Amino acid sequence: MKTWSGKLKATFHGPRHWELNKELWFFSAEAFDFLDCWRDLGVKIVKPRSMSKNEPKVKIVVSKSYHTDLASIHRAAWSFIAPWDVARAAVIHDVLYEALRENKANFSPACVAEMRKNADNIMLEGMRAAEPDVRKSKIMTVYLVLRLLGGMALKHSSFRERQGW
């Protein structure tokens, strides 16, 4: 079973603005235990018809025409953490954070923290599954930054939301 839908295909509309030209999907083992939670938040996530009992996975889907900034990394950091090789994982992560941010008032702080950690772990899993491989040092840097600072993204609207995409 493929892990990713293939290369990211998107149209550039200007600074920090890309639109997906085709559906993006990722098979995630990390999301399996949170399947119903993510569905309840409006994330398009499905169980495959045939699935390994040893390693169950679910398919997280981002629709064609989704607008994204690819990865919310400050331009100054691009020289050492350019988002291109982690962009697919970042788009999946953005969809999860967006759903959680929009619905966080309906959940306890502990539940929000648990869902945030799952979203970060899905990004980690996605970066590890990237083709071509992403340097391990970059994967861990991105993941640690997410764990340390990602909570702020749940408190404020995203760039995408502020732009009205």
Image (cartoon, rainbow, N blue to C red):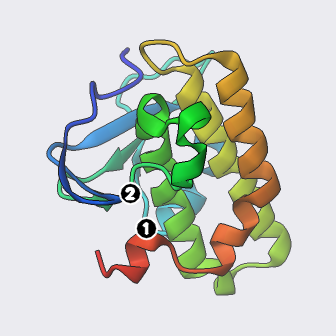
In the depicted view, which residue is nearer to us: 125 or 135?
Answer: 135
31 vs 135: above or below: below
Closest to the observer, 64 or 61: 64
Q: Is residue 69 left or right of residue 21?
A: right
Q: Which one is nearer the viewer's eye here, 82 or 20?
A: 82
- In the rendered image, the quadrant that contains the N terminus is top left
Disc 2 crowd rating (10 Å Cα; few below 14, some 14-19, many 20+) is many
Residue 148 horizontal side relative to residue 99, left or right: right
Determine whether, in the image, residue 21 is placed left or right of residue 164. Answer: left
Image quadrant holding the C terminus, namely bottom left
- Circle on res. 42: 1
Instruction: Please report the residue visible at 27 percent of the width from the left and 24 percent of the height from the top.
Output: 6
In the rendering, which numbered label is found on residue 69?
Answer: 2
Examine the rendered structure and indicate whether residue 30 appears above or below residue 40: above
**Chain-order first, disc 2 or disc 1:** 1
Name the amino acid, label 2. Asp
Q: Amino acid at mark 1?
A: Gly
